[in-house]
Amino acid sequence: MIRYEHPLNERVRTLIRLEDLFARARFFAAQDGAADHHAALLSLFDVSDVAARADLKTDVLQELERQKQLLTPLKTNPQIDQDALRALFSEIDAVSGQLLGQAGRSGSHLRENEWLMAIKQRSSIPGGVCEFDLPAYHYWLQQDPAARRNDLADWIEPFEPIHAAAAIVLRLLRENGRVSRHIAYRGVFQLMLTTTRVAQLLRLMLAKDMPCVPEISANKYALNTLAPRRAIGIAILFVNQKFVIN
Protein backbone atom coordinates (compact mmCIF):
# COMPACT_ATOMS: atom_id res chain seq x y z
CA MET A 1 0.00 0.00 0.00
CA ILE A 2 1.08 3.58 -0.69
CA ARG A 3 0.09 6.04 2.03
CA TYR A 4 -0.78 9.67 1.32
CA GLU A 5 -1.12 12.05 4.26
CA HIS A 6 -3.15 15.24 3.95
CA PRO A 7 -3.17 17.73 6.88
CA LEU A 8 -6.49 19.40 7.61
CA ASN A 9 -5.09 22.50 9.29
CA GLU A 10 -1.99 24.68 9.12
CA ARG A 11 -0.61 23.41 12.43
CA VAL A 12 -0.42 19.79 11.31
CA ARG A 13 0.85 20.86 7.89
CA THR A 14 3.80 22.61 9.57
CA LEU A 15 4.54 19.63 11.83
CA ILE A 16 4.63 17.21 8.88
CA ARG A 17 6.98 19.53 7.02
CA LEU A 18 9.27 19.66 10.06
CA GLU A 19 9.18 15.87 10.36
CA ASP A 20 10.18 15.46 6.71
CA LEU A 21 13.00 18.01 6.95
CA PHE A 22 14.35 16.51 10.18
CA ALA A 23 14.41 13.07 8.57
CA ARG A 24 16.40 14.42 5.62
CA ALA A 25 18.84 16.34 7.82
CA ARG A 26 19.52 13.32 10.03
CA PHE A 27 19.86 10.95 7.10
CA PHE A 28 22.43 13.06 5.27
CA ALA A 29 24.25 14.02 8.49
CA ALA A 30 24.83 10.33 9.25
CA GLN A 31 26.70 9.81 5.97
CA ASP A 32 30.40 10.45 5.27
CA GLY A 33 30.40 12.34 1.98
CA ALA A 34 30.90 16.09 1.66
CA ALA A 35 27.89 16.27 -0.67
CA ASP A 36 25.77 14.49 1.96
CA HIS A 37 26.80 16.95 4.65
CA HIS A 38 26.06 19.84 2.32
CA ALA A 39 22.56 18.39 1.81
CA ALA A 40 22.18 18.00 5.59
CA LEU A 41 23.06 21.66 6.11
CA LEU A 42 20.58 22.79 3.46
CA SER A 43 17.88 20.73 5.19
CA LEU A 44 18.78 22.38 8.49
CA PHE A 45 18.36 25.79 6.91
CA ASP A 46 14.87 24.72 5.80
CA VAL A 47 14.11 23.46 9.33
CA SER A 48 15.20 26.82 10.70
CA ASP A 49 12.91 28.68 8.29
CA VAL A 50 9.88 26.54 9.17
CA ALA A 51 10.61 26.57 12.93
CA ALA A 52 11.07 30.36 12.94
CA ARG A 53 7.30 30.91 12.88
CA ALA A 54 6.56 33.09 15.89
CA ASP A 55 3.49 31.13 16.99
CA LEU A 56 4.85 27.63 16.34
CA LYS A 57 5.97 26.94 19.91
CA THR A 58 2.63 28.13 21.30
CA ASP A 59 0.70 26.03 18.79
CA VAL A 60 2.68 22.89 19.62
CA LEU A 61 2.32 23.40 23.38
CA GLN A 62 -1.43 23.88 22.98
CA GLU A 63 -1.69 20.72 20.89
CA LEU A 64 0.29 18.71 23.47
CA GLU A 65 -2.05 19.94 26.20
CA ARG A 66 -5.08 19.09 24.06
CA GLN A 67 -3.78 15.56 23.54
CA LYS A 68 -3.29 15.20 27.31
CA GLN A 69 -6.90 16.22 27.90
CA LEU A 70 -8.09 13.66 25.37
CA LEU A 71 -6.02 10.95 27.06
CA THR A 72 -6.96 11.80 30.66
CA PRO A 73 -10.27 9.82 30.68
CA LEU A 74 -8.25 6.69 29.85
CA LYS A 75 -6.71 6.77 33.35
CA THR A 76 -9.84 5.09 34.71
CA ASN A 77 -10.16 2.55 31.90
CA PRO A 78 -9.06 -0.91 33.14
CA GLN A 79 -8.47 -2.09 29.56
CA ILE A 80 -5.70 0.47 29.04
CA ASP A 81 -2.07 -0.24 29.93
CA GLN A 82 -1.67 2.32 32.70
CA ASP A 83 2.12 2.03 32.77
CA ALA A 84 2.28 2.92 29.07
CA LEU A 85 -0.18 5.77 29.62
CA ARG A 86 1.86 7.19 32.49
CA ALA A 87 5.01 6.94 30.37
CA LEU A 88 3.26 8.88 27.60
CA PHE A 89 2.15 11.61 30.03
CA SER A 90 5.71 11.84 31.36
CA GLU A 91 7.03 12.12 27.80
CA ILE A 92 4.58 14.92 26.99
CA ASP A 93 5.42 16.78 30.22
CA ALA A 94 9.16 16.47 29.61
CA VAL A 95 8.95 17.78 26.05
CA SER A 96 6.62 20.60 27.09
CA GLY A 97 9.09 21.60 29.79
CA GLN A 98 11.95 21.64 27.30
CA LEU A 99 9.97 23.86 24.92
CA LEU A 100 8.99 26.26 27.71
CA GLY A 101 12.61 26.45 28.84
CA GLN A 102 13.86 27.34 25.38
CA ALA A 103 14.20 31.10 24.99
CA GLY A 104 13.28 32.75 21.71
CA ARG A 105 12.34 31.05 18.47
CA SER A 106 13.76 27.71 17.38
CA GLY A 107 16.77 28.04 15.10
CA SER A 108 18.15 31.27 16.53
CA HIS A 109 21.53 29.54 17.00
CA LEU A 110 21.78 29.22 13.21
CA ARG A 111 20.50 32.68 12.43
CA GLU A 112 23.06 34.21 14.83
CA ASN A 113 25.96 32.39 13.15
CA GLU A 114 27.28 34.74 10.43
CA TRP A 115 29.29 31.98 8.73
CA LEU A 116 26.25 29.71 8.41
CA MET A 117 24.04 32.56 7.26
CA ALA A 118 26.57 33.41 4.54
CA ILE A 119 26.33 29.81 3.33
CA LYS A 120 22.53 29.96 3.47
CA GLN A 121 22.45 33.17 1.47
CA ARG A 122 24.84 31.87 -1.20
CA SER A 123 23.03 28.52 -1.42
CA SER A 124 19.96 30.28 -2.82
CA ILE A 125 22.05 31.19 -5.90
CA PRO A 126 22.56 28.40 -8.49
CA GLY A 127 26.18 27.32 -8.06
CA GLY A 128 26.64 29.94 -5.37
CA VAL A 129 28.60 27.76 -2.95
CA CYS A 130 31.58 27.03 -5.18
CA GLU A 131 34.97 27.03 -3.48
CA PHE A 132 35.90 30.43 -4.95
CA ASP A 133 32.68 31.91 -3.46
CA LEU A 134 32.99 30.34 0.00
CA PRO A 135 36.56 29.12 0.60
CA ALA A 136 35.92 28.69 4.34
CA TYR A 137 32.99 26.40 3.57
CA HIS A 138 35.12 24.47 1.09
CA TYR A 139 37.71 24.04 3.86
CA TRP A 140 35.04 22.69 6.23
CA LEU A 141 33.79 20.21 3.64
CA GLN A 142 37.33 18.84 3.28
CA GLN A 143 37.68 18.09 6.99
CA ASP A 144 37.37 14.64 8.51
CA PRO A 145 33.79 13.31 8.17
CA ALA A 146 33.60 12.63 11.92
CA ALA A 147 34.42 16.27 12.66
CA ARG A 148 31.72 17.46 10.25
CA ARG A 149 29.21 15.07 11.80
CA ASN A 150 30.01 16.52 15.23
CA ASP A 151 29.37 20.04 13.93
CA LEU A 152 26.10 18.97 12.33
CA ALA A 153 25.04 17.25 15.57
CA ASP A 154 25.71 20.49 17.46
CA TRP A 155 23.55 22.43 14.99
CA ILE A 156 20.76 19.84 15.06
CA GLU A 157 20.60 19.45 18.85
CA PRO A 158 18.83 22.78 19.67
CA PHE A 159 15.98 21.72 17.38
CA GLU A 160 15.36 18.52 19.35
CA PRO A 161 12.60 19.90 21.65
CA ILE A 162 10.42 21.06 18.76
CA HIS A 163 11.24 17.87 16.84
CA ALA A 164 10.28 15.66 19.79
CA ALA A 165 7.07 17.61 20.33
CA ALA A 166 6.11 17.31 16.66
CA ALA A 167 6.85 13.59 16.75
CA ILE A 168 4.55 13.05 19.76
CA VAL A 169 1.67 15.01 18.24
CA LEU A 170 1.90 13.27 14.87
CA ARG A 171 2.27 9.85 16.50
CA LEU A 172 -0.89 10.36 18.55
CA LEU A 173 -2.84 11.64 15.56
CA ARG A 174 -1.78 8.66 13.46
CA GLU A 175 -2.33 6.02 16.14
CA ASN A 176 -5.74 7.31 17.22
CA GLY A 177 -7.25 7.52 13.75
CA ARG A 178 -10.20 5.38 12.69
CA VAL A 179 -9.75 3.16 9.65
CA SER A 180 -12.50 2.87 7.04
CA ARG A 181 -12.59 1.32 3.57
CA HIS A 182 -14.19 3.04 0.61
CA ILE A 183 -14.60 2.74 -3.14
CA ALA A 184 -14.14 5.76 -5.42
CA TYR A 185 -16.67 5.08 -8.17
CA ARG A 186 -15.17 6.16 -11.49
CA GLY A 187 -12.32 7.69 -9.53
CA VAL A 188 -14.40 10.17 -7.49
CA PHE A 189 -15.15 10.03 -3.76
CA GLN A 190 -16.78 12.52 -1.38
CA LEU A 191 -17.39 12.25 2.35
CA MET A 192 -18.91 14.57 4.93
CA LEU A 193 -17.08 14.31 8.25
CA THR A 194 -19.71 13.91 10.97
CA THR A 195 -17.44 12.90 13.83
CA THR A 196 -17.73 14.90 17.05
CA ARG A 197 -13.94 15.16 17.24
CA VAL A 198 -12.19 17.71 15.07
CA ALA A 199 -10.40 15.96 12.21
CA GLN A 200 -6.78 17.08 11.82
CA LEU A 201 -5.11 14.54 9.55
CA LEU A 202 -6.24 12.38 6.65
CA ARG A 203 -4.30 9.25 5.77
CA LEU A 204 -5.28 7.63 2.50
CA MET A 205 -3.85 4.30 1.34
CA LEU A 206 -3.94 2.90 -2.18
CA ALA A 207 -2.67 -0.41 -3.49
CA LYS A 208 0.77 -0.15 -5.08
CA ASP A 209 -0.44 -1.80 -8.27
CA MET A 210 -3.09 0.91 -8.78
CA PRO A 211 -1.61 3.27 -11.42
CA CYS A 212 -3.14 6.48 -10.13
CA VAL A 213 -2.35 9.38 -7.82
CA PRO A 214 -5.11 10.91 -5.65
CA GLU A 215 -5.96 14.58 -5.79
CA ILE A 216 -7.25 15.45 -2.31
CA SER A 217 -9.31 18.43 -1.24
CA ALA A 218 -10.28 18.32 2.41
CA ASN A 219 -10.93 20.28 5.58
CA LYS A 220 -12.36 19.38 8.98
CA TYR A 221 -15.87 19.19 7.48
CA ALA A 222 -15.57 17.38 4.16
CA LEU A 223 -13.27 15.19 2.07
CA ASN A 224 -13.06 15.01 -1.70
CA THR A 225 -10.72 12.77 -3.67
CA LEU A 226 -10.24 12.48 -7.40
CA ALA A 227 -8.14 9.87 -9.18
CA PRO A 228 -6.86 11.75 -12.25
CA ARG A 229 -7.07 10.01 -15.62
CA ARG A 230 -3.35 10.42 -16.17
CA ALA A 231 -0.76 8.93 -13.88
CA ILE A 232 2.92 8.85 -14.72
CA GLY A 233 2.13 9.92 -18.27
CA ILE A 234 -0.18 6.95 -19.00
CA ALA A 235 -3.85 7.37 -19.94
CA ILE A 236 -6.02 5.34 -17.56
CA LEU A 237 -9.72 4.52 -17.67
CA PHE A 238 -10.93 4.30 -14.08
CA VAL A 239 -13.93 2.26 -13.04
CA ASN A 240 -13.93 1.56 -9.29
CA GLN A 241 -10.89 2.35 -7.14
CA LYS A 242 -10.68 0.85 -3.65
CA PHE A 243 -8.79 2.67 -0.91
CA VAL A 244 -8.50 2.96 2.86
CA ILE A 245 -8.90 6.08 5.00
CA ASN A 246 -7.28 6.32 8.42
Image: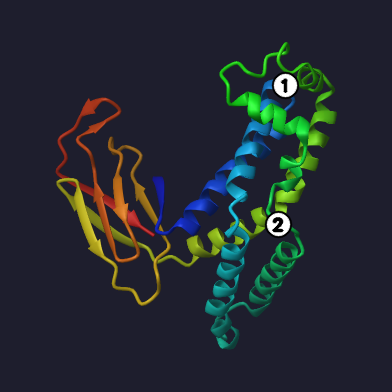
First of labels 1, 2 by sequence position: 1
156 with respect to 167 (left or right):
right
Tally the marks: 2
Residue in the picture at 49% in, 63% down: 173
112 with respect to 182 (left or right):
right
Residue 9 in which image quadrant: bottom left
104 and 5: which one is in front? 104
Vertically, is 221 above or below 206? below
Residue 62 position within the rendered picture, expressed as x and y whole percent measured from the top left: 58, 70
Vertically, is 239 above or below 8? above
Name the quarter where the C terminus is drawn: bottom left
Residue 31 position within the rendered picture, expressed as x and y whole percent measured from the top left: 71, 29
Q: Which amino acid does label 1 sit on?
A: Ala
Disc 2 designates what residue?
161
Residue 205 position within the rendered picture, expressed as x and y whole percent measured from the top left: 36, 50
Measure the alpha-carbon separation of dots 1 and 2: 27 Å
Residue in the picture at 71% in, 41% down: 111
At mark 2, the secondary structure is helix
225 and 185: which one is in front? 225
Q: What residue type is labelled 2?
A: Pro
Name the quarter where the N terminus is drawn: top left
Vertically, is 198 above or below 35? below
54 and 163: which one is in front? 54
Residue 13 position within the rendered picture, expressed as x and y whole percent measured from the top left: 47, 53
Disc 1 designates what residue?
34
Residue in the picture at 71% in, 72% down: 90
